[in-house]
Image: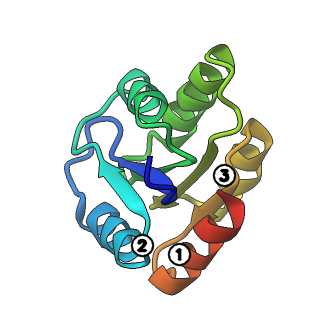
Amino acid sequence: MSGRLRVVIAKPGLDGHDRGAKVVARALRDAGMEVIYTGLHQTPEQIVRTALQEDAAAIGLSVLSGAHMTLFAQLMELLREQEATDIVVFGGGIIPDDDIPELERMGVAKIFTPGANTQDIVEWVRQQA
C-alpha cells in the first residue's frame, strides 16, 4: 500500500446526480489522496464492501434524494456489524440542517451542506481520517 489516505466517495440510492460527488472526489485526489469513486446507484452494502476491500480510512456519501436518514443509518449499522467503526463517515448534498444532529448521533462525523468549500472538505478529511 502506498501510504496515501484512501477515501471512498459514493452515491447511494436512486439519486442520479453525481456532479458534487465528482467535484469532491477530484479535490481529494488533487490533494494527494487515493479516491475510489463507486459510481451511481450504490447500496449501503456495496459501499461498505468497497470500503473494506479498499482499506479505506473514510467514506463520503453524496445524497440529494431525500433518503439520507435511511441511507446513512443503514451504512452506519453495516459498519458496526463489520466492526469497522474506525472508518470515518462524512456526507454532503441536500440535507436539511434539522437532520444533521440526528445524523451525528448515528455516528456520521460531518455533513457538508451545499456551497461547502472543497478546500475545507480536503482539510477536514486530512484531519479526521
Tell me which numbered mark, 3 or 2, is placed earlier along the sequence. Answer: 2
Q: Residues within 10 Å of mark 2 (few under 14, many from 20)?
A: few
User: Considering depth in this image, is 11 or 50 the residue closer to the camera?
Assistant: 50
Q: Amino acid at mark 2?
A: Gly
The mark found on residue 99 in the picture is 3
Q: Amino acid at mark 1?
A: Val
Give the residue displayed 34% in from the left and 65% down from the top.
25
Q: Residues within 10 Å of mark 1 (few under 14, many from 20)?
A: some
Give the residue displayed 51% in from the left and 56% down from the top.
3
Alpha carbons under labels 3 and 1: distance apart: 23 Å
Q: Secondary structure at mark 3?
A: helix
Q: Mark 3 and 2 residues: CB-CB less than 8 Å, in contact? A: no
Alpha carbons under labels 3 and 2: distance apart: 32 Å
The mark found on residue 122 in the picture is 1
Alpha carbons under labels 2 and 1: distance apart: 10 Å
Q: Secondary structure at mark 2?
A: loop
The mark found on residue 32 in the picture is 2
User: Considering depth in this image, is 25 or 41 the residue closer to the camera?
Assistant: 25
Q: Position of residue 101 (x, y in %)?
A: 77, 53
Q: Position of residue 32 (x, y in %)?
A: 42, 73
